[in-house]
Amino acid sequence: MEDTQQVKFEKMVYGGDCLGRLADGRAVFVPFVLPGETAEVEITESKERFARGRMVKLVEESPNRITPPCPYFSICGGCYYQHLDYAQQLDLKKDLVRDQLERIGKLTNLPEIPITGSPTAFTYRNQVQFHPVQNENAEASPSLGFNRASSNEVLPIEKCLLISEEMNEILKQIELEADSGIARTAIRMDSDSEIMLVFEGESPEPPELSIELPVSSTYLSPDGRSLNMGGNDALVYRILGKEFLVSPESFFQVNLPVAEEMVNHALALIAGQKNLSILELYSGVGLFSRFLAPHASQLTAIESSPSACFDFAGNLDEFENISLYEGAVEYLLPPLIEQIKPIDLVVLDPPRAGLNAKARQALIDLDPEQIIYISCDPSTLARDLKHFSEAGYSLQSLHAFDMFPQTAHVETIVILQRTQQRNL
């Protein structure tokens, strides 16, 4: 018999879930419900101190609930907030950033947290990744889809509201055979509306593909090689009037207007400062580096992705004051410390896992004057800020950015100032 309970929900928590209390007092986390709502909940995971569940029936509805425009909402695992007005999504994300910084980071007396929203709450993504649908009998159904919520099962998708009409038109026309060997397919569109299909598979060689679409196509093999199958071998993105060439296997921001706002904000934090000795960690293809370089007497960048390093070198070819090191920050930074000290400013944009412990300690040992931390996960940001606070850095400002409307993700940029000189 299913374990179901009627639960009154209290508040949203980071990650997309809403928190309620079971009859025994344990917290239960359930997606797609809102604070103040009552729902019948099936328990899907039960631990000693908490449980997880899924909504079976909504008993009492919040006045804040709106009708989600996407038919896949709550079935697909991509969006979590389509049942909430966009202005309220922004307020929620501000509150969640504050909660993480206070609860995990132990930061107190935080200022008001401004948030910059996306100009468009839908159709903002310039890249999306699909999985093949494992259904040999459904000839008429889409070949691609997203993982279902809380599952690895692939849900066939006919249209995603987060991408443009042009990308959705391409999606409709992609047909994959059951034995294609393709594990993932990304659709990317650049600033010139050029579309690239990026196929990934387990074979070192690409499968036979018949492409009759006006797109470029690339195959990424398991060893990381990018094999051009037709059209352009890179995409062009424009940020604040600057062009960035991006290889198929390189990362670039998926919401260009918000990316521009983030670059502008980072530059405002160092307005008027010149001839800085700058260290940039996780530099990618050089998005922030391109705009930081004019402020630097010397900019040292570290990036682990070979393709991103290749793109970085091309995108910053005009500058003479840049050194780029290819490899993991936790391995490259410790032996570089004595060579690059003193550093005025560190800019870092790590993955969701935040700073590796070795990288974080190396950064503390480097003892820079200022740190600009660009985060895509407030929980790992909070953890890292706690360590920096203990090492003598104070939080000077923080600003949230909604790079991913409708989802549980939020970006944050903070600047830290060294307030205590370390005795090294």
Image (cartoon, rainbow, N blue to C red):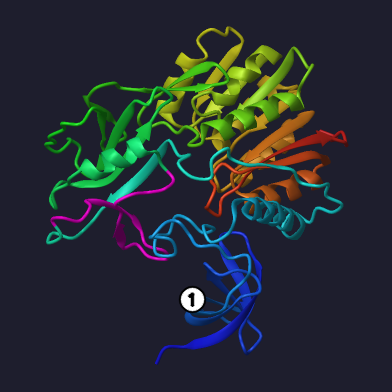
Identify the amino acid type marked 1.
Met
Q: From the viewer's perspective, is residue 165 above or below residue 215?
A: below
Query: Which part of the image, by quadrant, shows the N terminus?
Result: bottom left
Question: In which quarter of the view is residue 154 placed?
Answer: bottom left
Does the image show residue 214? Answer: yes
Q: Which x, y percent locates residue 127?
A: 40, 38
Residue drawn at point x = 56 percent, y = 41 percent: 403
Q: Which x, y percent locates residue 166?
A: 33, 35
Residue drawn at point x = 50 percent, y = 10 percent: 317
Does the image show residue 335? Answer: no
Q: Is residue 157 magenta?
A: yes
Which residue was labeled with disc 1?
55
Left or right position of 399 against 108: left
Left or right position of 27 against 284: right
Toward the bottom, the furthest residue is 1
Magenta stretch, residue numbers: 139-162
Label 1: which secondary element: strand
Residue drawn at point x = 30 percent, y = 54 percent: 157
* Magenta stretch: dominant secondary structure: loop
Q: Which x, y percent locates residue 64?
A: 63, 65
Residue drawn at point x = 66 percent, y = 20 percent: 339
Q: Which x, y percent locates residue 132?
A: 25, 51
Q: Is residue 280 magenta?
A: no
Q: From the viewer's perspective, is residue 326 above or below residue 406?
A: above
Q: From the viewer's perspective, is residue 280 above or below residue 318?
A: below
Of 286 and 186, the residue lying toward us = 186
